[in-house]
Image (cartoon, grey):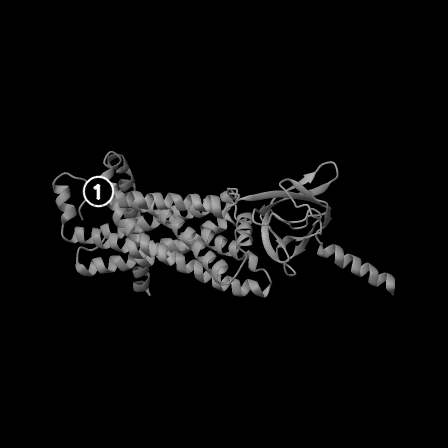
Amino acid sequence: MQHSKTQDTLVGLFVAAGIAALFYMALQISNLGSYGNGEGYTVSARFQNSGGLKVKSPVSVAGVKIGRVSSITLDKESHEAVVAMQIDARYDNLPDDSSASIYTAGLLGEQYISIDPGSSEDYLKNNSKLDITSSAIVLEEMIGKFMMNKAEGK
Amino acid sequence: MLELLEQLGKAARGSFAKLGRGTFFLMHALSGIREILPRPSLLIKQMYSVGVLSFLIIAISGLFVGMVLGLQGYYILSDFGAEESLGLMVAASLVRELGPVVSALLFAGRAGSALTAEIGLMKATEQLSGMEMMAVDPINRIITPRFLAGLISTPLLAAIFSSIGVMGGHLVGVGMLGVDDGAFWAQMQNGIDFNEDIVNGVIKSVVFGFVVSWIALFEGYDTLPTSEGVSRATTRTVVNSAFSILGLDFILTALMFGDI
């Protein structure tokens, strides 16, 4: 086998590909990197309980995905969860009296935010707030309530 | 009865002697690193034959393993309504286990067998003795660059395998079966920890690369200098590498992820 320039280049390419794969694993597969944000605007909503909602969970209107959850923080004053959502720039005509609810996809599936459009003439802008919200349904809580009602009924 | 014992003793003595020779061989090869570092062209040549030429088989196998994981995982997870966890399942199995193990097995078959045959033939045709006659240390000159090339190539190949596998899983899961794109990545990134999973996977593949290169080069160096000897040594390389990889994988997994 002859030692040549092409060989050097190919080895260089191989090492670069390997290192790129390591970076890809670190940034894309693991929790190390933060996902790059696309175009869009951010709105926030307050929930009593954000349940199993996670950063990057989907935000949908009528079942169609329009954005993602970008951060979930706790408001220290009111002890409510403040959920910021990144909405795709295409959907810039959501009424500002829309309501947000947290639902679960399937019984054990991932939780997502569903936005129910209101009837206002004004639209949501960057940094607007959704005032009407309904919290995540916690299964244990519901079962507990159901059991209590049963016990009281008898 | 006595004969049986005698044979057992002989076999045990033989394997201990081989282990000893192998250890001295390894020490000698490692001591050659100092002489190789100022001459990187030797290393680059071996990186080409060991790493670059293994790239294609690793990339294609990674793609198909990822695609199969995507399909199988989807059918099982959809029974529980948990298709969104597909990304996590594909990535966790690739990064923790399949990436390092399968790429090391393929590496043993693709590059390890070639190394054994090459070194074995060099010995059979007395090229190694020839070098010694010219006062060139054949272990430093021939073995060390190949050993280093194997050691450097395996973690890179394993990383390429895992990354392409995840892309394959994404292709099948999101592209064909309609799993939500964001949930696929979100669950994956929530579930895979950099230090816990990825660093441990890389450590595994470094260990496998070390062991496979050692076995392949030593079997070649220790072969009987006949065509039958070379053929046997090549077979032993592949078989022993596979055993060592799978056995070590269990031990490493128990140490890294279990609470033993």
In screen coordinates, is B13 left or right of A150?
A: left
The residue at 23%/36% (across/down) is B39
Residue B81 seen from this side: yes
* Residue B14 position in % (x across, y down): 28, 54
Pick whichever, B210 or A8, lies toward us.
Answer: A8
Q: Quadrant of residue B131?
A: top left
Residue at figure coordinates x 79%, y 60% from the top left: A146
What residue lies at 30% left-to-right and 60% top-to-bottom?
A: B6
Q: Position of residue B96 (x, y in %)?
A: 47, 51
Taking the image as shown, residue B186 lies to the left or right of residue B123, namely: right
Kind of residue at disc 1:
Lys
Q: Quadrant of residue A4?
A: top left
Q: Is residue A17 left or right of residue B76?
A: left
- The residue closer to the viewer here, B218 or B208, is B208
Query: As drawn, which residue projects farthest toward the front?
Result: A121
Characterize the local packing of mark 1: few (<14), some (14-19) or many (20 or more) Cα atoms within 10 angstroms: few
Question: Which subunit holds the residue at mark 1?
Answer: A
Asked if residue B237 lies left or right of residue B194, the reply is: left
Can residue B148 be spotted in the picture? no
Count how many numbered circles sit on residues in the image: 1
Closer to us: B124 or A85: A85
Q: Which residue is mark 1?
A: A5
On the rendered image, what quadrant is the N terminus of chain B found in? bottom left
Q: Secondary structure at mark 1?
A: helix
Q: Position of residue B13 (x, y in %)?
A: 30, 53
- Give the residue displayed 40% in from the left and 60% down from the top: B64
Q: Provide residue A127's location: percent of width, then percent of height.
A: 64, 40
Depicted B21 relative to depicted A108: above or below: above
Image quadrant where residue B171 sits: bottom left
